[in-house]
Amino acid sequence: MGDSIDTAMRRVVDHGHFILGPEVGLLEQKLAQFCGADHTVSCGNGTDAISLVLMAENIGPGDAVFMPAFTFVATAEAAAQLGATPYFIDVNADDFAINPDHIDGAVSDARSRGLRPRAIIAVDLFGLPADYARLTATASHHGLVLVADAAQSFGGRYQNHMVGSLADYTTTSFFPSKPLGCYGDGGAIFTNAAPRADLLRSLRFHGKGQDKYDNIRIGMNSRLDTIQAAILLEKLTIFADELELRETVAARYDALLRPHAGKVIRPVVPAGRRSAWALYTLRSPERDAIRNACQAAGIPTNVYYPIPLNRQTGYRNYPVSPAGVPVSEQLAMEVISIPMHPYLTEEDQARIVQAIVGH
Ligand SMILES: *Cc1c(COP(=O)(O)O)cnc(C)c1O
């Protein structure tokens, strides 16, 4: 896409509307169309997207925000920055998402600690949407706001709905390594409620009212650069095709690894869901040996995530649900993410699998 992206960037440099230029509004429309959400509010990055949502819901000191222990730190950071209490819940071993069965117990426990239960942030880990039917029912039963942290899953699908319209708010990230990545930081929020979208637009722009120098609330400075929007507009034109290609790459890995089920556990995609395949993540008790073998063969791998949030130095004083987080602990020891992108060739995949199973 080199030439079309260069031209798009040049266009922004020429018109000079670097902040909230025309490409930003156009991208917001196209993203909303793509995922079926009524409103899209772009912002500076995926972490700010979560913060803005929590600010829009007035979540702060004394409030509990339930989230999986096995996720990237940004999910907890957004809550902690606002003075709210990140509350860690274990994940399922199959879809790596927050375990809905543990939420009832966590809500009672949070109350007994004097916290107000306010929101669930579900994380669609590695690109696979969580079980939104279950989570929506649980959230509404307890009167909690449901937020989908879809930083890794934009383009995924749950039943007949694209990621973006599955929760009260959906946040995503355009960090370069995410499925739809830009050339720096970027993020967006999706919601179906117009008043929420208006509030988010104010919050991302210093809490503006009628104009920039009329400040009706405390907000922040978090906008998507026009240059990044222009790049994303170009990349969005091939994004649906890239999702198909990721699906093909995942299916090839699945076929190549199936005979080695004793050695590695392949990712599962429950019926009715489609992953955006941000990452292709295996589990194995021999994880570290596999990593070394891959490294020796010149194949990059990574461990997302080696330490659950409840054990991170900055976060270990926050509450953990009464059920504990044994699955998160186990996953931290067993997961390994292997190369995944739309243009991975069959030959490279065969070589990668050989390094994994032949060590
Ligand atoms: C990447 C990521 C974020 C943060 O996105 P940034 O754009 O890097 O701020 C939040 N949550 C999850 C699960 C992520 O993977």
Image (cartoon, rainbow, N blue to C red):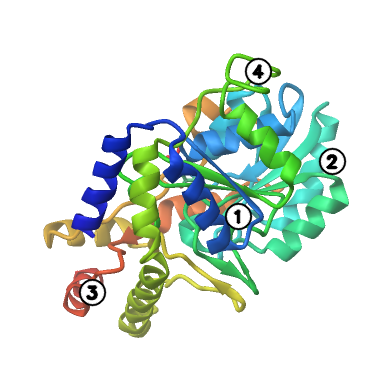
Name the quadrant of the C terminus: bottom left
Residue type (three-letter) at the residue carrying disc 4: Ile
**Does residue 307 appear in the picture of this structure?**
no
Q: CA distance from mark 3 to mark 2?
A: 47 Å
Q: Which residue is mark 4?
A: 218
Q: In terms of sequence position, does the residue under pointer 4 or pointer 3 come before the other?
A: 4
Classify 10 Å Cα crowding around label 3: few (below 14), some (14-19), many (20 and above). some
Classify 10 Å Cα crowding around label 1: few (below 14), some (14-19), many (20 and above). many
Q: Is label 3's Cβ within 8 Å of ligand 1?
A: no
Tag 3 and tag 2, C-beta contact below 8 Å:
no
Camera-side residue: 222 or 24?
24
Q: Which residue appears at 64% of the width and 44% of the height?
A: 67
Classify 10 Å Cα crowding around label 2: few (below 14), some (14-19), many (20 and above). some
Residue type (three-letter) at the residue carrying disc 1: Val
- x and y percent of residue 230 in the render? 36, 47
Q: Nearer the viewer, mark 2 or mark 4?
A: 4
Camera-side residue: 235 or 127?
235
Q: Which residue is mark 2?
A: 108
Mark drawn on residue 91: 1
